[in-house]
Image (spheres, helix red, strand yellow):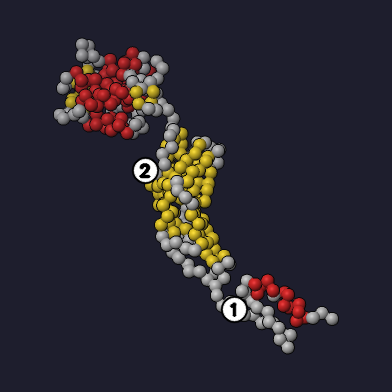
Amino acid sequence: MTNLKLSSCYALASAAMLGIAACAGGTDGSSRFASPTSPGFDVVVGAQTAQLCKSGPVGTYNFDLVYGGTTNTGDATVSTPVAVQVTDANTPACTTVFTRTQYAGGQVDPARSVQITEQAAAGTTLTNIITTDGAAPSTSNIAGRTATVYVNAFHSATATFVNEAVVESCTYTKGWYRNNGSNTIIALADGLTKSQQQQVFNATPGQPGNVTWTGGNNTLNLYQQLLAAINNLGGNETGGPAAVDAAIAAAKAGTTVTTNNGGVQITLVAGTDVSGLINTLSAFNEGSLTGFPHCAD
């Protein structure tokens, strides 16, 4: 005959080891469940992560991490900086940078923050940061190359940094636009039509044509360098190196252009740093700046 009392004890053995129940023998052959007397810190009730993902050209990308908030017994961090290796430009590469585990009986702490900052990667530009809200709303700053996500034991979060390869552009001089590039001039640069721009490029101190200017011959040189730079950038006046973008803005602010009777009048604004702007813009147009070499004529 089967001993029911003994079988019941075997059936409850594993539960008793976890502190969920205890089997005790008695003369009446019954079993009873007892509550544990201390928290079971080996029992996980929640675990979530902060994921860092990188999408972009194949290569290694480095990130700095800063952890904030109250630490918990089940927290797992990684050392900083952390490297993410992209092996397929079409598939984001991801890694776990933080794990928060909640154990039975443990205190549920507020969310832990993870600030992730991408180090500059040569040949690429950061175009987007995509975050998912975890235990609190995430934040991102593309200009600062930074995202902050929040994780607790019940809410995960992900930050995906998206890079694109820098497309190298080449540049032409103002002389090239005068002699060879009339058919490549963009529709408008500083408000001038193609034919008006060509008049400016063709003008020289000895043969000004229908172009006039104030402030000396360097005013004409400055404006020609400005038009060449805008054309080299395809009309995107903030698409070059920072110094060139600033010089374009300053040159536009430092000159006033009017058109009448088919001619172009360039007026220099007092206080304009003519020689400094010429140096910056001509260096760009001549292909002296990294990432913008001189085009083959």
Image vertical order of residue 61 relative to residue 277, above or below = below
Which residue position holds label 2?
143
Q: Marks 2 and 1: CB-CB under 8 Å?
A: no
Identify the image quadrant of residue 241. top left
Within-10-Å neighbours for mark 1: few <14, some 14–19, many 20+: few
Quarter placement of the C terminus: top left
Which residue position holds label 1?
35
Residue 283 lies, in percent from the top left, at: 31, 23
Q: Earlier in the sequence, mark 2 or mark 1?
A: 1
Residue displayed at 52% across by 51% down: 96
14 or 151: nearer the eye? 14
Residue 284 lies, in percent from the top left, at: 32, 25
Image vertical order of residue 290 relative to residue 45, above or below = above
Residue type at numbered disc 1: Ser
Residue 244 lies, in percent from the top left, at: 30, 30
Quarter placement of the N terminus: bottom right
Residue displayed at 22% across by 16% down: 210
**In this orientation, does residue 193 appear?**
no
